[in-house]
Amino acid sequence: MRNIIGQAVSGNDFFERPQIVRKIRRALRAFNWVYLSAPRRVGKTSIMNHLQENPEADQQYVYAITQSIDSVDGFYKELAKQVIDSPAFRTMLKVTDTLKKVASALLQRINLKVSVPFLDLSLDKGEPINFQTDFEKMLEELDLDGGKLIIMVDEFTETIDNIMLKHGKQEARRFLQLFRELTHNRKLTSKVQFLLTGSICLQPLVKKLEVSDLVNQLQYIDVPSLTEDEACSLFRQLIGPEDIQIDEDTIRFTLQKIDWLMPFHVQLLVQEIIDVFESSGNPIDQAKAEQAYQQIFHQRNKIYFEQYYERLKKRLEPGAEYQFVHDVLNRATEESPLEKSVVHDLAVKYGITDNYKATVESLEYEGYLHQTADGTAYRFNSSILKNWWKKYVC
Ligand SMILES: Nc1ncnc2c1ncn2[C@@H]1O[C@H](COP(=O)(O)OP(=O)(O)OP(=O)(O)O)[C@@H](O)[C@H]1O
Ligand SMILES: [Mg+2]
């Protein structure tokens, strides 16, 4: 297994996460449309890659990433492109005239250089096209011989956010309304499903748009962190090719320092363990492991964390909300947990008492904070994020 830091993995580089994969498959088998909910860098895209590479019988996957799309038309255009370009589509045995007509017209306009044997570009009469209705029509006409097409949309929530920022709340509501209609189309229920994800939290976003009801048909599935045993096993697989001597206790000691066991954080740790090994040799004892942990915060790894911060900056309203979040996270780096009453006082200070709860909820979702067991205070989720914030942002 290679240590691929920062990029989604596939094939043999994917560390098995059977629990979450089973959960998604079960939901899909029950004909649900699924929203895979998890903060940045938790492994959503890697899980989607894994599903696509390992479909169950009668399932075919299509993957689309809509991160930079900021219009309703653009969204359905991209989905049409990916569906037409998929093996599921190109190998269909039965093709109706309506499908030929709709898909040919779509293909004319999506800038896709593929040849699909049964599509005839001369059928296009040049009429104006509505990507959303034509895409839906195309799905209705698909004949998958009893099989199911699962359309995975990565960064779905980014698209909602982009549409809201560019065209306003009303257009973002229209986007969700149209999507909801698609989920209610009875002609699709037995053959098409969606698996959506995004690293911006969907719930606060739809709350902001006052349309929570438009997404309540989705089944939400969280991506949990790894257990300590899983993280240990990933650690061992990643150091596998190196001749590193490190005992189980030392691995667990360092993993406990990370405390939020996401594959990405284990990858960073392993990178630094290898670095320490190269400069000081075997065995890797606790002192060397501690050194490796500290090296994670080296300038050269800044690039990995800046993406978290960039995302945060983009999503927050400049001014009061931004300053509030800064203050909250600065205080959360302190030793003792950040009391909820202090968070409330900060909301008063910045004049955002009406909305601050949704803001804090987003920080929880995005992997910065979690509530203490008694529910009275917040802590940083990950010691890595906390130390990085302390060193570079505070
Ligand atoms: N199952 C896994 N096995 C090995 N590495 C993984 C696994 N899941 C995630 N990673 C690693 O974690 C990091 C993030 O993975 P990925 O891009 O899949 O997450 P993501 O949730 O889609 O992130 P983003 O929010 O940035 O899109 C990458 O460095 C990837 O190599
Ligand atoms: Mg991703």
Image (tube, rainbow, N blue to C red):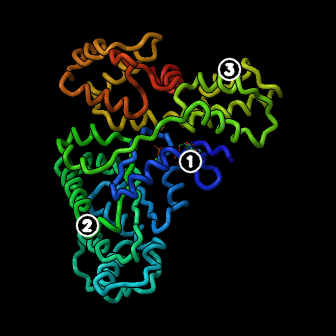
Considering the image in quadrants, where does the C terminus appear? top left
The amino acid beneath tag 1 is Gln
**Tag shown at residue 290:** 3
Can you give x and y, in whole percent of width and height, for residue 256 in the image? 59, 23
In the image, farthest residue toward the bottom? 122
The residue lying at 32 percent from left, 71 percent from top is 139
Residue beneath label 2, please? 132
Mark 1 and mark 3: span between their CA atoms? 26 Å
Residue beneath label 1, please? 7
> Is 72 on the left-hand or right-hand side of 250?
left
Can you give x and y, in whole percent of width and height, for residue 14 in the image? 60, 49
Of marks 2 and 3, which one's residue comes earlier in the chain?
2
The amino acid beneath tag 3 is Glu
The residue lying at 25 percent from left, 25 percent from top is 356
User: Which one is nearer the viewer's eye here, 155 or 51?
Assistant: 51
Can you give x and y, in whole percent of width and height, for residue 52 in the image? 50, 60
Confirm or deny contact between disc 2 and disc 1 (CB under 8 A). no
